[in-house]
Image (cartoon, helix red, strand yellow):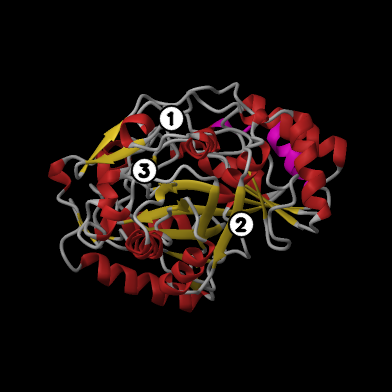
Amino acid sequence: MKRSGRRVALLAWYPAENPAMPPFIPNMGMYMIAAGLNAAGIEGLDLRIWDERTRSAAEVAAEVAAFNPDIIGGSAFLWSLPALVQTAQLLAKDDPSRLIVLGGPSARPNMLALAPFRDAAAAIDVLVEGEGEAVFTALVQAQDRRPEALSRIPGVTLRQKGDWTRSPPAPRAVLDLLASPYQQGLIPAGGIGLMETYRGCPFTCSFCEWGVMEAPKNVLSTARIAGEFAAMDRLGLNALLLADAGLNLNGQAFTALRRAAEETGFLKHRALIAEVYPKSLTEDHIRFLEKVGAPHIGVGLQSFDDATLRHVERKFDPSRLGGLLGVLRSVASVTTEIIMGLPGDTPDSFLSSFARARALGTGLRVYHCAVLPSALMARAPAEDLMDYDEVTLKMRSCRGWPPGSLDLMAQRMSDEAAAAGGASGDYFWIFPPA
C-alpha cells in the first residue's frame, strides 16, 4: 500500500560541466512542478527540492530517506536518468510504501527497458510522459494511491504486474495559467533565464523530441512574459534562453514576446539565445533582433543532403539559405547546426555538409546523433539498423554509417575543432566562423 501523505521530494541533476556548454541553465521542468504544487493550495504540503550537480545517488538517497517523503518526483533527462534510477532503487528498498514518479523526456517505458536501467527501473511506480504540472499535482492530491485509483488520473503511465499501462491523455496545459517558478522566487540566482512562449513544433522530424504543436494559440501572453522579465530582472539574470522550437515558428507567441520586450526594455541590454527556422524569417523578426542587446541565433540545417533529410522527415530548402543568413548575420551572432550520424546519411555525405556549413561564414555546431526515446528510438524503421550506446544514446552505427565510422568521424571533428580554435563537448563540437 502506498502512503497518502503530502510530504514531497523533487530531484534533478545537471549535466556535467564541459567547455562547450553555456553557463548555468536551471532545471526548469522540476521547478515548474514545484511552482504548480505551491500554487495548488494543497493542505499539509511539505515540499523539498534536491537540485544536484555532482553528488552521487547514494548521498542524495540518504538525505531524501532522512526527509522521509511520501512521494518522490524525478526530472529525467538523458544525463540525469542514471542517477535518478539508482536513487529510486535505494529509496524503494528503504521503504516501498513511497510513490516514486519520473517525468521528463527520458521518463519513457522504452528507455527504462534498456539493459542498463531494466532491473533498477522496477522501483519506479509512475511515469508522466506528457506535460507534468497538472498531472503531478493530481498525484500529490490523491488520497488513494493504489494503481487502480491512480489509473483514473489522466496522463499517467503506471507500472502494473511488471508492465506499463497508460491512462487517457491529460488535457493540454494553458500556458498562461501555469504557476511561475521565477515569480515564486524558486529559481536559483545566476546563469541564464529560461522561457517557453509556446510548446511543440509544427515539424515532426524523426530525430527530434519537440513534439507536435497541437494548439498554436496556446501561448504566453504579453503580460505574463513581462511578469517573467520582471522576476528575472530581480534575480539579476543577464541572458534569456528561449526554449521554443524556434523564434519564428509561432506568430502569436512571437508577437507577445516582441511586445513584452518593447514594454519592459528587458532585452535591450541582455543576450537572447534562440533558434530560427530560415524559411519563416520575416522583416519583423529582423527588426526585433536589432533591438536586442546581444542576440545569438541557431539555425538547424541538420544536413545538406536531400535524401537524408527526407529519410528523417526534415523539411529544409537550402536555396534561400545564403541570403537569409546574410540578413541574420547583420543583426545577430549566428551558428548553424548539422548532425553527424543521421540514419540514411554517409560519412562522405556528412563531410560534404560539413564543408558547406563551414563555408557559410557563420559559427557551426556539429551534434553527434542521439537515439532519443520519443524520437528515433520510437520512430526509426527496423531497416535503419541502429546500434547505440544505451546510456548516452549516442549512435554507434546505422544505415549509411558502418561500425567504426562514427568513432573515426568523432575523432576527426575533435581534431578539426581544436585546429579551428573551437571546443569539443560530450555530444557536440563548436566551430567559430571560418
Q: Against 179, is 403 above or below?
A: below
Callout 3: few (<14), some (14-19), or many (20+) C-alpha neighbours within 10 Å? Answer: many
Identity of the amino acid at label 3? Val
State the mark number for residue 7. Answer: none
Q: Nearer the viewer, residue 226 or 154?
A: 154
Q: Position of residue 215 (x, y in %)?
A: 53, 22
Task: Please tell me which of labels 1 and 2 falls first in the chain.
Answer: 2
Callout 2: few (<14), some (14-19), or many (20+) C-alpha neighbours within 10 Å? Answer: some
Q: Position of residue 165 (x, y in %)?
A: 26, 34
- Distance, label 3 to label 2, CA atoms, is 24 Å
Task: Please tell me which of labels 3 and 2 falls first in the chain.
Answer: 2
The C terminus - image quarter: bottom right
Location of residue 309 (image quadrant): top left
**SS under mark 2:** loop
Please indicate, yes or no, whether residue 187 appears anywhere in the rendered image. yes
Q: Against 414, is 178 above or below?
A: above
Magenta residues, start to end: 280-292
Location of residue 310 (image quadrant): top left
Identity of the amino acid at label 1? Val
